[in-house]
């Protein structure tokens, strides 16, 4: 079974926007796993069903922004928008 790290490395043949999406998703799942949280626990925290959390973590599905915000908040994180110019200078 591939890990999320394997998946994030194996995305060279897909469009850039989908690469960014998969990279963000892989990081979210990685943070969940590092925190020792299960999908069921994320479900309890967010109020989303466990199958919804599973679908969210599937890169072939596109999550809604509301769902992403709930998921990130369950991890103690927040969604921020950083201007490209700022990010490129770092």
Image (spheres, rainbow, N blue to C red):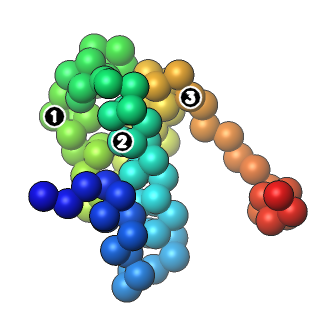
- Name above or below for residue 17 compared with residue 14: above
Asked which quadrant contains residue 68, the reply is top left
Of the numbered discs 3 and 1, the one sitting upstream in the chain is: 1
Of the numbered discs 1 and 2, the one sitting upstream in the chain is: 2
Q: Which residue is mark 2?
A: 29
- Horizontal side of 5 relative to 90 (left or right) equals left
Residue 52 position, x and y percent, is: 23, 35
Q: Which residue is mark 1?
A: 51
User: At 60% from the left edge and 31% from the top edge, which residue is drawn?
Assistant: 78
Residue 40 position, x and y percent, is: 20, 22
User: At 46% from the left edge and 25% from the top edge, which residue is drawn?
Assistant: 75
- Name above or below for residue 34 compared with residue 84: above
| Viewer can see residue 52 | yes
User: Depth-wise, is mark 1 or mark 2 nearer the camera?
Assistant: 2
Image marks 1 and 2: residues in contact by CB distance under 8 Å: no
Crowding at mark 3 (Cα within 10 Å: few <14, some 14-19, many 20+): few
Task: Please identify the quadrant where the N terminus is shown.
Answer: bottom left
User: Depth-wise, is mark 3 or mark 1 nearer the camera?
Assistant: 3
Image marks 3 and 2: residues in contact by CB distance under 8 Å: no
Crowding at mark 1 (Cα within 10 Å: few <14, some 14-19, many 20+): few
Asked which quadrant contains residue 45, the reply is top left
User: At 75% from the left edge and 50% from the top edge, which residue is drawn?
Assistant: 82
C-alpha separation, residue under disc 3 versus residue under disc 1: 22 Å
Task: Please identify the quadrant where the C terminus is shown.
Answer: bottom right
Crowding at mark 2 (Cα within 10 Å: few <14, some 14-19, many 20+): many
Residue 58 position, x and y percent, is: 25, 52
Of the numbered discs 3 and 2, the one sitting upstream in the chain is: 2
Q: Which residue is mark 3?
A: 77
Q: Secondary structure at mark 1?
A: helix
- Name above or below for residue 62 compared with residue 32: below
C-alpha separation, residue under disc 3 versus residue under disc 2: 12 Å
Q: Secondary structure at mark 3?
A: loop
């Amino acid at each position: 079974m591939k890990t999320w790290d394997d998946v994030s490395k194996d995305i060279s043949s897909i469009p850039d926007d989908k690469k960014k999406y998969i990279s963000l998703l892989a990081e979210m799942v990685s943070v969940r796993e590092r925190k020792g949280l299960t999908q069921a626990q994320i479900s309890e925290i967010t109020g989303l069903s466990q199958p919804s959390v599973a679908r969210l973590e599937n890169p072939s599905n596109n999550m809604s922004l509301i769902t992403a915000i709930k998921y990130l908040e369950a991890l103690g994180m927040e969604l921020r928008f950083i201007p490209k110019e700022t990010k490129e200078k770092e």
